[in-house]
Amino acid sequence: MDVSLSERLAAYLALQGSTTFFLQTVSGSPVEVEVLRQSIESDPERGDVLHRCSRLYVRDTNNIILVAESEIALSYLDDDQRQRLIDRAEGIGKLLDPGNQGLLQKRDIQTLRVPAPRSLQTRSQWAISRHFALNFNGANCGEIREILNNESLERAR
């Protein structure tokens, strides 16, 4: 990966738990989720799988910190979690581990330097894409790809 990392971005890349809680700690403010697209598709092996494209922001919808694409197998969630996820009520990490007790673990699949997507709304042309498997209560329940850069992460301050 050929991109300079701020201390905060390096801490994000080492993160094993909830991205939402990490960003809330950095910002001292609640992190909100804007769901851009969402669908549920049936998978013969995993059952219903929620596919979501979203942005996380702090204080204002124009204060975007990261963009994410996720797929979560709904069979791993209880009825309340499933409905709240479908209703777009909150971020995945905050929903699955509301007390940030370590119920979530990330297993990195790939981390790349990528062109910054326009939806990130940064001047920088480059970003980091972190693709990981998400384990919930010890079971692999899905995969998430989060894209951010030093500039977007600084907005959390």
Image (cartoon, rainbow, N blue to C red):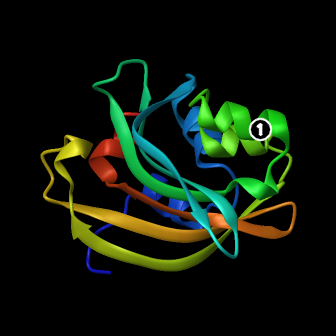
- Residue 157 seen: no
Residue at 78% from the left image edge and 57% from the top image edge: 75
In-image side of 96 versus 6 (left or right): right
Across and down, in percent, residue 134 comes to 67, 65
Q: Nearer the viewer, residue 150 or 125?
A: 125
Task: Residue under label 1, please give it.
Answer: 81
What's under tag 1, amino acid-wise? Gln
From the top left corner, tell me how far across and down residue 140 is, in percent.
74, 70
Placement of the C terminus among the 4 image quadrants: top left
| Picture residue at 80% right of the left edge, 49% below the top | 77
Q: Quadrant of residue 16?
A: bottom right
Q: Is residue 68 visible?
A: yes
Query: Around disc 1, counting alpha carbons within 10 Å, would you say few (fewer than 14), some (14 to 19), or many (20 or more)?
Result: some
Q: Position of residue 60 (x, y in %)?
A: 36, 18
Task: Look at the numbered disc 1 and give the secondary structure of its residue.
Answer: helix
Residue 87, position as x, y percentages in the image: 60, 29
